[in-house]
Image: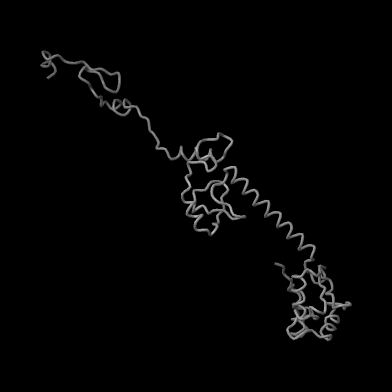
Amino acid sequence: MTDARLPGYWLTELRFMDMSDRLWRIFTNALMWCAEQGTDGAVQSRHYRFLYSDGVTEDDIDSLVVAELAERTDDGFQLQGWADDRGLRQSSAATVHAYRERKRKNQAKYREGLRSRLESGDVTGHVAEHVGVGPQEVNSVKGASAYVTGNADLRLDAKKVDPTVCAKHPDGDAGVSCWGCKTAREARAASEPKKIAFDPAEVFCAKGNHKWLADGTCNYCPEKRRVVPKNEEWMYR
């Protein structure tokens, strides 16, 4: 899509202020038509019907010439100073073409990058053109887009993705060279319950709560107590 420019300072220029509504419509429609068609301000007489519904007359062209906005050609007229910063300040056809070509290449490079990352396991989910699966629909990893594809079937499938399994190597671990395997290992490690090791001797025996056995030893620590014989129990009463 192309745009025709209407600078704000034109509101105070006499050549525009003195225009009739009809002539202003013809002039601005000519700007839009030339920008869209890439003619750099050239309009042939057979295309006058696009500039005004009632048709463009020779007097209309003369008025544009008098306002120094156009000059006549053999088959129509040419708007003056089309891409001049001191003239009409419009984008030339070459500039528009270069912009579109640069944008096309950037989009192609971006999509190729997404495909490469998907194939390497760097991104889980589906990549269609430059739109990826949203993070709310799938347990995504680095690089996933914030947009969804709009395909309900793909979203249902995405919900079934297991983050602990590499999408490229579901049957095993391919080693350190695969990003998907690495993130799957990390997900498996994070999902395993944490085992807290403790020393019963520190928990019980440090407080003097030994677990005495019949032979006078502690079940948790090397501590041993003296077993009082039956015939000496009266000494400790």
Residue 198 at x, y = what percent? 35, 29
Between 205 and 53, the residue placed more toward the observer is 53
In the image, is residue 108 above or below residue 89? above
Q: Quadrant of the C terminus?
A: top left
Between 87 and 47, the residue placed more toward the observer is 47
Residue 17 at x, y = what percent? 77, 82
Residue 9 at x, y = what percent? 75, 74
Image position of 3 (left or right of 121) = right
In the image, is residue 173 above or below residue 218? below
- Residue under the point 82% across and 79% down: 45
Image position of 200 (left or right of 7) = left
- The colour scheme used here is one colour
- Residue under the point 78% across and 68% down: 38
Residue 207 at x, y = what percent? 28, 28
In the image, is residue 78 above or below residue 202? below
Q: In which quarter of the image is residue 76?
A: bottom right
Between 24 and 155, the residue placed more toward the observer is 155
